[in-house]
Image (tube, helix red, strand yellow):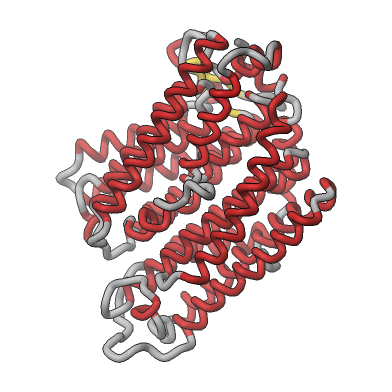
Amino acid sequence: MIVYRHLPILPIVLPFLGAVTALVLKQRPRAQVVIALAAMSAALAASLALLVAVRAAQAPLVFQVGGWSAPFGITMVADLTSALFVVMSQVVLLLGVVYAVGSRERCVGYSTFYPLFLFLATGLTGGFLAGDIFNLFVFLELLAISSTVLTAISDDRYGVEAAYKYFFMSQVAAVLLLLAIGALYVSCGTLTMAGLATTIAANPDRALLPVAAALLTAAFMIKSAVFPFHFWQPDFHTAAPTPVSAMLSSVVVKLGVYGFMRLNTLLFVDHAHLLGPLLTGLGIAGILYGGLGAIGTHNLKRMLAYSTLAQVGFVLVGVGWGTPMALAAAIVFAFNHSLAKAAMLMLSGFVASRASVKSAAFEVVTGVGRPLPFAGALFFIGALALAGIPPTNGFIGKLLLFRSALEARQVWALLAIGAAAVLSLIYTMRAFMRIWWQPAADGITTKPYGDRLYAPALLVALVVVLGIASEPLVAVAWEAAQWMAVPELYIGAVGK
């Protein structure tokens, strides 16, 4: 019973304790590896238990830190939406550690790598479960600092430059978020999401609320690298170590998407008619811009970074429409994209590690994959998932999005989404053909050793399993969307 009551805090505490323990044992690298694997495995188990418990209870689970009830204490809240996002993140984070264990990048051997990775996991998970805006800010800062340092220690010579760009943009988002926090507190006298939702619904015309909504929107746009606040993202994700870039481009950007869901369905429900069209328009712009950017780039990891801009656009379109079907489609698409994109970035790191000149530039990796057919098969399936082709889970996400477009009678958006799906197929298949079919350039050979394929193979297997047996994920996503349509469930569980 005690464990059940503490379930909302366990996915945060376990990686945090692992990070602290790994720091203490910084002189014992093998012990750090064991601790990182154990901490993330335990966190994933706790996250799955949390999802099962929330669904069984048919109500959000709330943990008041220190026994101080809202709005005076720190409140952690797990409803179906946050629990699903936590499970999604923990799956990818655990396999990120698995990839790091088999990686040949020098930075993975640094004594600070695994502690920072676990702090990143703590910040990301805490952001999804935070029940008030201020502690969301705290977890975002922990996430930003960890990501910045992990990129700065990269083997890539541009790692420090990319880390500076990311840290600068993170501080811009932090300032915007702090200003929004101040505006909300002055206007509403509380910072808990439940309290804010109640106060705003009672008087949506309060002073400073439009300012707070605009500031929060801008902050989340930066965090999720939404067009036109995307310009820092390709450099940052390309220069980061592969185990880190796989996290940044798959699950970390989803924290901003999660923020938009809370804005549209909990905090500013009466303003959704203004925010929804904005998210839809920005999502479609990102879909097209990201797809064209991915086609025009000459680096495999950079191509996948632009692809993230497009894929996040699909999710924003669903959030912007705001119907239960569209929200369920957004959740499924976000879940599926996280698995597929993490796998594709790990495969790009694998290919770069096998090239005689370690680089993900197409002129270097062209032809490198010809002696590596298993990796080619994994990449091909991952490409199908990004393009939304069966039997992968990407097909399920896009099918639900198409159905929600028809339900909302958004034919013009449906055409844009269809065009973007074609763009996804073009740039992923072009990369596949260059790496696994074309002959290598002069002086480029395939090394007999490199990063290991355990993690991307498991992720691709999940991509296929969730494409063939998609009903459980779709069912939970549909329930989560229905919960979001009734914000009183969240408010009643937490109180003011």
Rendered residue at 69%/24% (across/down): 59
The residue at 30%/91% (across/down) is 442
**The quadrant where residue 25 appears:** top left
Instruction: Residue 418: tell me if it is visible.
Output: yes
User: Eyeballing the image, is 354 above or below 310?
Assistant: below
Q: Residue furthest left?
A: 27
Determine whether 13 is above or below 420 in the image. above
> In the visual, does 464 lie left or right of 362?
right
Q: Quadrant of the C terminus?
A: top right
Quadrant where the image shows the N terminus: top right
Query: Residue visible at 37% across and 60% down?
Result: 238
> Seen in the image, is 428 located left or right of residue 387?
left
Residue 160 in the image, given as x and y percentages of width and height: 24, 52
Q: Is residue 1 visible?
A: no
Q: Residue 50's x, y, as percent?
A: 57, 33
Residue drawn where x is 47% and y is 41% of the image: 223
Residue 323, compared with residue 332, is above or below; it is: above
Q: Position of residue 46 (x, y in %)?
A: 51, 36
Left or right side of 35 for 7: right
Question: Could you say where residue 142 lies in the image, as x and y percent from the top left?
Answer: 35, 34
